Amino acid sequence: EDKVVQSPLSLVVHEGDTVTLNCSYEVTNFRSLLWYKQEKKAPTFLFMLTSSGIEKKSGRLSSILDKKELSSILNITATQTGDSAIYLCAVYNNNDMRFGAGTRLTVKP
Amino acid sequence: GAVVSQHPSRVICKSGTSVKIECRSLDFQATTMFWYRQFPKQSLMLMATSNEGSKATYEQGVEKDKFLINHASLTLSTLTVTSAHPEDSSFYICSARGLGGGPNTEAFFGQGTRLTVV
């Protein structure tokens, strides 16, 4: 059965800290991995990763995929209270998009 | 990014009645739509995947007769919760993937529907 596992499930940091969120997967016919941020309702798209070793960057956020290790990390540097959210990792196979349990990040002032 | 509109955002219904939730892609054609359910403080659980013009593929444990999914056009998919019970109360959210977009195309989310069955 396809699995997407995120760690940690919960993380509390202070403003200015750097965090690394992990996502590992066991999926048949892997096609791509996506990161989303969910605050109140709908998840908002962060990154889509299809190739190993190529870092994607957007401001203080960056992410990279390791297909050999079947994993991805999401880094957030110089965290701000507005980064507090649930970060979801999702994996596409040929047809489905499945999510991990999410990491609940709390950034304290 | 593309816009997906989900309606209603919130609905309260009586036990035993049916509720229809609509998911529309407003500025693109969605060949694939995903329906998820989310319990409080939990992640999105895939219920079914629907491709336009064909029957939805349901995840194990999801009753297809209870959660009717119709994806009759490239811009509209509906989820009908039939004979709703209090345990069906949840947050339902759809996401849509564009025309010609395989798994290398991101999916866009609706705003979700909070269903409460009383």
Image (tube, coloured by chain):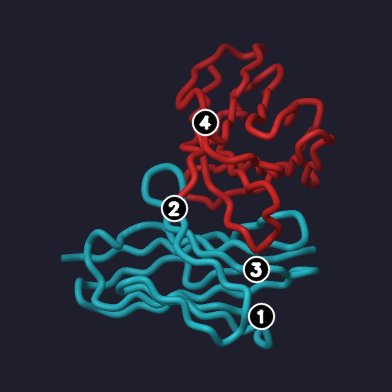
Mark 1 and mark 4 on one chain: no
Q: Which label's residue is closer to the chain start, 1 or 3?
A: 3
Q: Amino acid at mark 2?
A: Thr
Q: Position of residue A75 (x, y in %)?
A: 40, 77
Q: Residue placed at 53% from the left, 26% from the top?
A: B115
Q: Which label's residue is closer to the chain start, 3 or 2?
A: 3
For mark 4, name the chain: B
Residue that badge 4 annotates: B6
Q: CA distance from mark 4 to mark 2?
A: 15 Å
Label 3–label 2 contact, CB within 8 A: no
Q: Amino acid at mark 1?
A: Leu
Give the numbered dot on residue A70: 1
Q: Secondary structure at mark 3?
A: strand
Q: Is residue A69 above or below residue B99?
A: below
Residue that badge 2 annotates: A44
Please state which of the two labelled residues, at mark 1 or mark 2, is closer to the viewer.
Answer: 2
Q: CA distance from mark 1 to mark 3?
A: 11 Å
Residue A107: quadrant of the picture = bottom left
Q: Which label's residue is closer to the chain start, 1 or 2?
A: 2
Q: Amino acid at mark 3?
A: Ser
Mark 4 and mark 2 on one chain: no
Q: Residue placed at 57% from the left, 36% from the top?
A: B25
Residue that badge 3 annotates: A32
Which part of the image, by quadrant, shows the N terminus of chain A? bottom right
Position of B43 with respect to B29 (left or right) is left
